[in-house]
Image: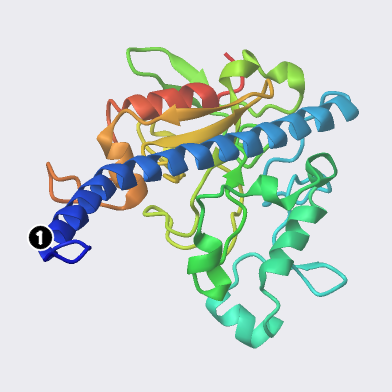
Amino acid sequence: MRKNGFTLIELLVVIAIIAMLLAILVPSLLYVKEQATAILCAANQKGLSMGWLLYMDDNDGYLIGGSTYNSTDYRWCERPLIASAPMPIPFGVNPANYEANMASGQLNMEARMRGIRAGTLFPYAESEKLYHCPNDKNYVRETTEYKVYRTYAIPGLMNGEDFRTNTITLPGGGTRQFKMAKKNNDIVSPSQKYIFVEEDVVNSPVHGKQWHNLGGFVLMGGSNYWQWWDIPAFYHNDRSTLGFADGHAEKHTWEDPRTLYLMKNEPDPSTGSVPGNTQTNNEDIIYMNRGYFPGR
């Protein structure tokens, strides 16, 4: 007489079926998670963009300071601030030595949050979480001095750090002039000009590790049209999010494999090496350069 229950063969069959279902479902669930975080990231950038516009409305059309380099009193965000009476951590320090020898442990997350709150954009944003992409894990996986929290940067020509005034040769002929936007009427077609970019400054294959998201987002270093100087982050697989000067935000899909290999610091299988930051005929560079110039 057979007892109730499964035989070993039946159990193995059930386990195999479950394993097959998991193999199908897990990638789909991961994709859904990626999509959800990309939506949250775009919502953050939309919130920052709306704050950026409100600041401009309150200041006679003048743009908020887009760089932490410049000595102004209207920077959108500050460097990490130490001590209860906020003191900015100096430029040019070695973060690996700074904590032990100078700040005695004060280069921490609270110092980073103080820097965010001290920026002129914060009264309009009102939440530190808007400055951080949910898929940016640097603040939990890096050593203390590189636990960078702020994900987003403002482009160099949006009242930022890119003070070049020279011209650059465009593909197919013609030139464009670098010209800083200071007021709202300096920006032409604001729905096509981005003002916030995801940037991974801790794992940059071009600049190496930085202890905070310094400066802004700059393109065409050395005036080479085809060169990534700063590069967007890859927190959403083949996409990144951008916030635009009309207040909207969107997910952008990268078209050229070289872009993603460079972002991820991974070898291109076709060459066996990580692509350099100069990439001729890259559609992604064309797209980003087009939105980088505020004017025509």
Q: Quadrant of residue 188?
A: top right
- What residue is at 62 percent from the left and 86 percent from the top? 100
Taking the image as shown, residue 179 lies to the left or right of residue 284, namely: right
Q: Residues within 10 Å of mark 1 (few under 14, many from 20)?
A: few
Q: Is residue 278 visible?
A: no
Q: Quick check: 65 above or below 77?
A: above
- The residue labelled by disc 1 is 9
Quadrant location, the C terminus: top right
Image position, residue 135 (x, y; %): 50, 50
- Horizontal and vertical percent position of residue 203: 42, 58
Residue 53's spot in the image, x, y percent? 77, 27
Whole-percent x and y of residue 231? 44, 43
Can residue 138 be seen by looking at this rendering? yes
Helix, strand or loop at mark 1 = helix
- Residue at the (13%, 64%) spot, across then down: 2
Judged from this view, the residue extending furthest toward the front is: 1
